[in-house]
């Protein structure tokens, strides 16, 4: 749940979740389905679906993780590109991108606001926003049973545009010291990139992995 610490990290069984969906005036984000569901008290539901690994999906997840802190243009740029952010080169395109994202989120009842005094963008849901993550069968632990640790990490990082190091340690049940050599090897191979954001750090797919995924999609379209 965003904005209500007392209700975070709850485990809700499916029947109870269905009742909550029907009873509450709220916005629900289904992370694995990449879908936003707006549930007002009256009128039809509003649905917004993101395509897999789209820039809009990546940006929305970044904003969710940032919560009330918000994001600057430079932080959004670092999650999208390995190049240093330069206002004169990247600012205009990023603002156009955020304007498109703002129009999409508005349909579901979420405002994307900009605070000029601090230079940060923030999500402002008009209703409570619930972040729902399914307890899928393919957790990092089960993926690791069939693949190497490197491949398991790649699969996990590919699920989102950016994953914090602390999240990887928690989900894989390993310390930073244990996980570091594998992450370092993936960085050296160009398969992932280390991203630093102030006191936090995390990883996103590297250019080689992105190019490989693009080639696979192109082959599927041709086939």
Image (tube, rainbow, N blue to C red):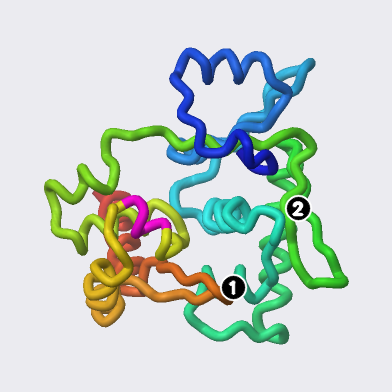
Query: Image point 27% across, 59% down: which residue?
Result: 174
Residue 56 shows in the view: no
Query: In the image, which residues are magenta?
Result: 167-171
In the picture provided, is 124 more to the left or to the right than 75?
A: right
In the picture provided, is 101 more to the left or to the right than 111?
A: left
Q: Nearer the viewer, residue 64 or 219?
A: 64
Query: Image point 52% across, 69% down: which residue?
Result: 79
Figure quadrant of the N terminus: top right
Q: Element under label 2? A: strand
Q: Earlier in the sequence, mark 1 or mark 2?
A: 1
> Quick check: 158 above or below 29?
below
Q: Element under label 1? A: helix
Q: Quadrant of residue 40?
A: top right
Residue denoted by label 1: 77
Q: Residues within 10 Å of mark 2 (few under 14, many from 20)?
A: many
Query: Image point 49% across, 40% down: which residue?
Result: 31
């Amino acid at each position: 749940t965003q904005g209500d610490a007392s209700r975070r990290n709850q485990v809700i069984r499916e029947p109870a979740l269905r009742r909550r969906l029907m009873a509450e005036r709220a916005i629900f984000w289904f992370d694995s389905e990449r879908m936003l569901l707006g549930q007002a008290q009256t009128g039809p539901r509003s649905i917004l679906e993101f395509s897999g690994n789209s820039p809009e999906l990546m940006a929305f997840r970044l904003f969710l993780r940032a919560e009330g802190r918000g994001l600057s243009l430079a932080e959004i740029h670092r999650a999208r590109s390995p190049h240093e952010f330069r206002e004169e080169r990247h600012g205009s395109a990023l603002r156009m991108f955020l304007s498109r994202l703002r129009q999409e989120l508005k349909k579901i009842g979420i405002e994307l606001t900009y605070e000029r005094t601090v230079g940060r963008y923030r999500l402002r849901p008009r209703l409570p926003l619930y972040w729902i993550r399914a307890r899928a069968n393919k957790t990092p632990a089960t993926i690791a049973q069939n693949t190497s640790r490197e491949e398991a990490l790649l699969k996990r990082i590919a699920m989102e545009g950016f994953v914090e190091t602390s999240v990887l340690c928690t989900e894989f049940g390993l310390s930073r010291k244990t996980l570091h050599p594998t992450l370092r090897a993936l960085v050296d191979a160009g398969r992932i990139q280390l991203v630093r954001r102030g006191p936090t750090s995390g990883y996103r797919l590297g250019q080689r992995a992105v190019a490989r995924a693009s080639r696979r999609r192109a082959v599927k379209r041709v086939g």
